[in-house]
Image (cartoon, rainbow, N blue to C red):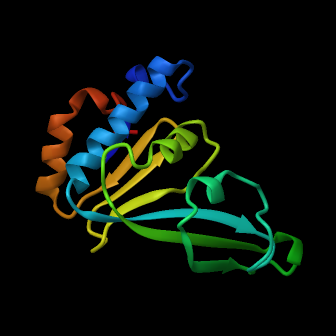
Amino acid sequence: MRFHSLPDSKRYPESEEEYAIVLDRYNTILDELFAGTDVFVVTMDWSDTPTGPERYPTPRQTLHPDGIRWWTESEQDDADPEFHTHTRLYADRRRWSRGCLDALLRAVADEALVEVLVADTELRRIHHPYDGGADVILATPGERDRLRDQHQEWLSSHPAGL
């Protein structure tokens, strides 16, 4: 399910008041999913080589300093090495508390950092924030429906829910 982070499906915050709304919406959903539990925080970067520097420098290292390299997914189907990419995932485990990811979530809202995931340690509930909102994957349709019903005003008016 998809939640928008600002009223009227506005994509980017332009004031501190709007950043406060974005962070409150992210944290409210994250609290409902993970309060009192440990979570995995996953961030990503991309490179031309499996171990080389980031192709597009981001604040990932500063905002996720405890993330350890967990996985590298290499795309090398193209015969031209210039088009090879290596997606590297970094993860850490921490106790969820409201606000513990605010700097990271603010960077996501600004699209300075992309492809962030927060998941329970069983990977049954996943929160994927992005600039403009968050996609949430839940373990059961009942959980999805309860969360959707609690935050109707944060849903898209688009028929497909996007």
| Residue found at x 56% / y 74% | 68
Observer-nearest of 45 and 151: 45
| Residue found at x 55% / y 28% | 12
The answer to whether 57 is drawn above or below residue 93 in the figure is above
The answer to whether 72 is drawn above or below residue 45 in the figure is below
Q: Percent x, y for residue 53?
A: 80, 68
Q: Percent x, y for residue 122?
A: 27, 74
Whether residue 11 is visible here, answered yes or no, is: yes
Observer-nearest of 117 and 106: 106
Observer-nearest of 118 and 141: 118
The answer to whether 99 is drawn above or below residue 64 in the figure is above
The answer to whether 84 is drawn above or below residue 5 in the figure is below
Q: Is residue 151 found left or right of 24 in the rendered image?
A: left
Q: Tell me which corner region of the image, top left, top right, bottom left or bottom right, holds residue 37.
A: bottom left
Q: Is residue 51 found left or right of 154 in the rendered image?
A: right
Q: Quadrant of the C terminus?
A: top left
Q: Percent x, y for residue 100?
A: 40, 49
Whether residue 159 is visible here, answered yes or no, is: no
Q: Percent x, y for residue 92?
A: 46, 69
Q: Is residue 132 found left or right of 39 in the rendered image?
A: right
| Residue found at x 66% / y 63% | 45
Q: Tell me which corner region of the image, top left, top right, bottom left or bottom right, holds residue 124.
A: bottom left
Q: Tell me which corner region of the image, top left, top right, bottom left or bottom right, holds residue 98.
A: top left
Q: Is residue 98 found left or right of 43 in the rendered image?
A: left
For the image shown, how many numbered marks are present on the structure? Answer: 0
